[in-house]
């Protein structure tokens, strides 16, 4: 359990950036925490790493650095903050106790998300088929969300006032969130044969289902924002009514009315 708390401390340290700006607990701090957890796994378990766990830890670093870097760039170089004004709480509207609660719960979620790799290392499971399949799924998700972000940035440079419906956005309206879910699905799958007890299963499930919930919550916020910005555009209405919001070929076109998706 000492190694688990060491990983939690790393997650708390990285995500503490949210005390500077509230929303960073679940954005830049999220990416930084996952990257630092990956680095922590490499150091803490350096004597028992296998090819699979080595690459899984490196994937965490790549994932976290890409996410934190992209979000930092968006904060500095784009009008994202102006578009989000009023949609998320400001720093002054959240008291310190609430911030501490969000900080701790978010940091714990990040640890639980990465727990399948942690449990593989703790339980001395080597590189097997589940591990390799999980790595392939995660890598696919990372490539998908990276490509989606690049395509969106390119499209917005051409026409910043128009919604994006090109490239991967023809498949689903939130391909970056889809890539995120695929990434963590791979992490969860990689540990399906390593959990020794109910507690380990519960930790892994909470981490996996937690990030799926957060992604659908993010999709709901995006839909509300896009409806506000493009709701009178017939092309947007046609696009929204014909393109699934998150999962390809599943006719789920809206989550706007699902108020329980608060993330």
Image (cartoon, rainbow, N blue to C red):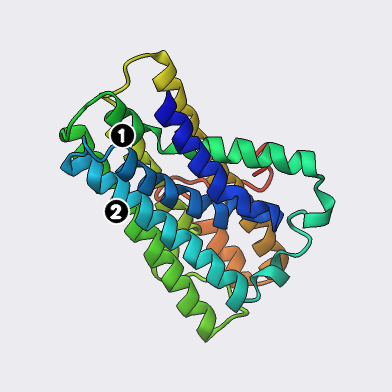
Residue 228 screen position, x and y as percent: 72, 64
Is 19 situated above or below 130?
A: below
Residue 80 screen position, x and y as percent: 64, 70
Residue 102 screen position, x and y as percent: 67, 40
Q: How many marks?
A: 2
Q: Is residue 245 left or right of residue 233?
A: left
Q: Residue at x 17, y 35 (%)?
A: 127
The outermost residue toward the top is 197
Determine the image quadrant of residue 146: bottom left
Pick the residue in front: 102 or 224.
102
Q: Residue at x 39, y 70 (%)?
A: 167
The outermost residue toward the bottom is 158
Asked if residue 70 can be seen in this view, the reply is yes
Is 166 situated above or below 25?
A: below
Q: Which mark is residue 250?
A: none
Q: Residue at x 52, y 46 (%)?
A: 252
Q: Is residue 189 left or right of residue 163?
A: left
Is 52 situated above or below 142?
A: above
Q: Residue at x 56, y 83 (%)?
A: 159
Q: Is residue 59 left or right of residue 170?
A: left
SS at mark 1 in the image: helix
Residue 172 screen position, x and y as percent: 45, 57
Asked if residue 254 can be seen in this view, the reply is no
Pick the residue in front: 138 or 22.
22
Q: Residues within 10 Å of mark 1 (few under 14, many from 20)?
A: many
Is 9 situated above or below 73?
A: above
Per the image, the residue denoted by label 2 is 140
First in residue order: circle 1 vs circle 2: 2
Per the image, the residue denoted by label 1 is 189
Q: CA distance from mark 1 to mark 2?
A: 14 Å
């Amino acid at each position: 359990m000492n190694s688990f708390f060491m990983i939690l401390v790393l997650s708390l340290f990285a995500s503490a950036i949210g005390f500077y700006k509230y929303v960073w607990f679940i954005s830049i701090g999220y990416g930084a925490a996952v990257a630092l957890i990956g680095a922590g796994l490499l150091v803490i378990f350096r004597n028992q790493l296998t090819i699979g766990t080595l690459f899984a830890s490196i994937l965490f670093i790549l994932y976290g650095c890409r996410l934190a870097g992209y979000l930092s760039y968006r904060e500095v170089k784009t009008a994202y903050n102006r578009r989000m004004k009023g949609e998320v709480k400001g720093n002054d509207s959240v008291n310190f106790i609430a911030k501490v609660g969000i900080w701790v719960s978010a940091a714990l979620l990040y640890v639980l998300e990465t727990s399948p790799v942690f449990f593989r290392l703790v339980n001395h499971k080597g590189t097997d088929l589940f591990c390799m399949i999980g790595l392939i799924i995660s890598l696919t998700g990372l490539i998908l969300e990276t490509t989606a972000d690049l395509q969106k940035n390119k499209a917005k440079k051409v026409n910043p006032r128009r919604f994006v419906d090109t490239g991967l956005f023809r498949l689903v309206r939130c391909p970056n969130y889809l890539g995120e879910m695929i990434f963590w699905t791979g992490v969860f799958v990689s540990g399906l044969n390593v959990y020794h007890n109910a507690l380990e299963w519960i930790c892994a499930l909470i981490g996996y289902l937690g990030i799926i919930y957060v992604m659908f919550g993010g999709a709901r916020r995006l839909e509300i924002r896009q409806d506000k910005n493009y709701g009178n555009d017939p092309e947007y209405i046609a696009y929204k009514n014909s393109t699934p919001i998150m999962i390809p070929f599943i006719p789920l076109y809206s989550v706007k009315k699902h108020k329980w998706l608060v993330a």
